[in-house]
Amino acid sequence: MHQHLKPIILSSLLLGFYIHSFAQSGFSNSPDSARFVTGDIDNFWKAFDHFKKDTSINTFGKEYIDIGSDGVKGFTPYRIRSADNLYKMVKKRQADYEKVRTSTLRIKEKEKQCRSTFYALKYLYPLAKFPPVYFVIGAYNSGGTSGDQGLFIGAEMQNNIDGLPGIVAHELIHFQQNLTGENPTLLQQSIIEGSADFIGELISGTRGDDAANNYGNAHTDRLCKEFVSIMNGTERNDWLYGTSKKDDRPNDLGYWMGYQITAHYYAKATDKKQAIYDILNIKNYTVFLKKSGYLDKYLK
């Protein structure tokens, strides 16, 4: 992530699970149609400046959330949560918000690079839908997610805006995924996240979390043995969104594992565009794993 999404919060698919799997039909399949909306960032800083003049007054409801775009409305239920929650977070981490102000105001500079990932996806997956991308400022708990209204990027989390195209690409892939069901297994959720990293890398040229990738590559045998023993359960700790600290592993090794499975599936495919379609429309994750061949020697 892109420092990004992974260590930071539950994925878009875990909270309000699969809310976008049925939402794509309302958007165009032309990359040119996608809007990149940054006006909420300007609204936030106006509210922030008024807050600084009198920190006893919560300005973030009336001056930010209430007048916010559909992105703010979509980001509020599970991320911003409420004006009171945002106010408390700003009071607690005022200096952190100050540090990212300049970079958030430069986000609009990355629109062309982000849109180029949309063109790349259109080539690989002609059925792709391209929703608006909303850059909003939240409560320091989410780098990005997607929902009915489009893609939401937590601007305050983006310390390095050069990584934005990869973050947007990851969420764009989540938006395309044809998902069903609730309470996914560790295998399913790992493939969902890892495949978003894999295709996101194809279209943006940037890979996910270096810490998880480096650790996974250095401890592959041990991790594969552990993963196959628990992959059909729904416990995600030590693999997705958090660790028990039982060892020195970083967060979100499930992304690394899902990436490996997806990469092996794609590498074996003779028709690459069909492979992209398959990855975005997985019906049975156990069958997909089997076809990838990645964990075969651990499953015998």
Image (cartoon, grey):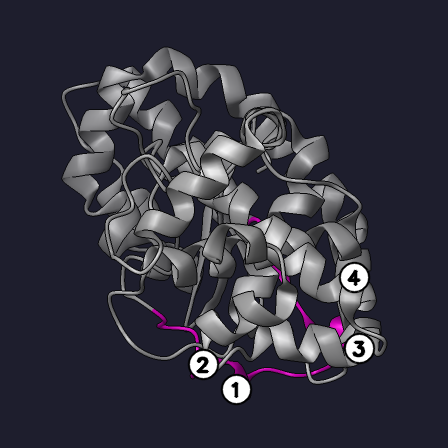
Tell me if I can see residue 278 in this picture: yes
Quick one: SS at disc 4?
A: helix
- Res 23 label: 2
- Coordinates of residue 126 in the picture (x, y in percent): 76, 82
* Image quarter in which the N terminus is found: top right
Quick one: SS at disc 2?
A: loop
Residue 48 belongs to the span the image colors magenta: no
Task: Please give the name of the residue rendered at 31% of the width and 57% of the height, measured from the top-left corner.
Answer: 14
Disc 1 residue type (three-letter): Gly
Q: What's the distance in space between the residues labelled 4 and 3, CA to CA?
A: 12 Å
Instruction: Decide: few, some or many residues near mark 1? Use Cα within 10 Å; few <14, some 14-19, many ≥20.
Output: few
Task: Please give the name of the residue rendered at 18% of the width and 32% of the height, measured from the top-left corner.
Answer: 58
Quick one: SS at disc 3?
A: helix
Instruction: Decide: few, some or many residues near mark 2? Use Cα within 10 Å; few <14, some 14-19, many ≥20.
Output: some
Instruction: Decide: few, some or many residues near mark 3? Use Cα within 10 Å; few <14, some 14-19, many ≥20.
Output: some
Q: What's the distance in space between the residues labelled 4 and 2, CA to CA?
A: 30 Å
Q: Quadrant of residue 31?
A: bottom right
- The reply to whether the C-beta atoms of the residues labelled 3 and 2 are less than 8 Å apart is no
Q: Nearer the viewer, mark 4 or mark 2?
A: 4
Q: Which mark is first along the chain, 2 or 3?
A: 2
- Coordinates of residue 171 in the picture (x, y in percent): 55, 57
Q: Nearer the viewer, mark 1 or mark 3?
A: 3
- Res 267 label: 4
Disc 4 residue type (three-letter): Ala
- Res 42 label: none
- The reply to whether the C-beta atoms of the residues labelled 1 and 4 are less than 8 Å apart is no
Q: Which mark is first along the chain, 3 or 4?
A: 4
The region drawn magenta spans 18-38
Q: What's the distance in space between the residues labelled 1 and 3, CA to CA?
A: 23 Å
Quick one: SS at disc 1?
A: helix
Residue ID for mark 1: 26
Task: Please give the name of the residue rendered at 70% of the width and 83% of the height, measured from the top-left corner.
Answer: 29
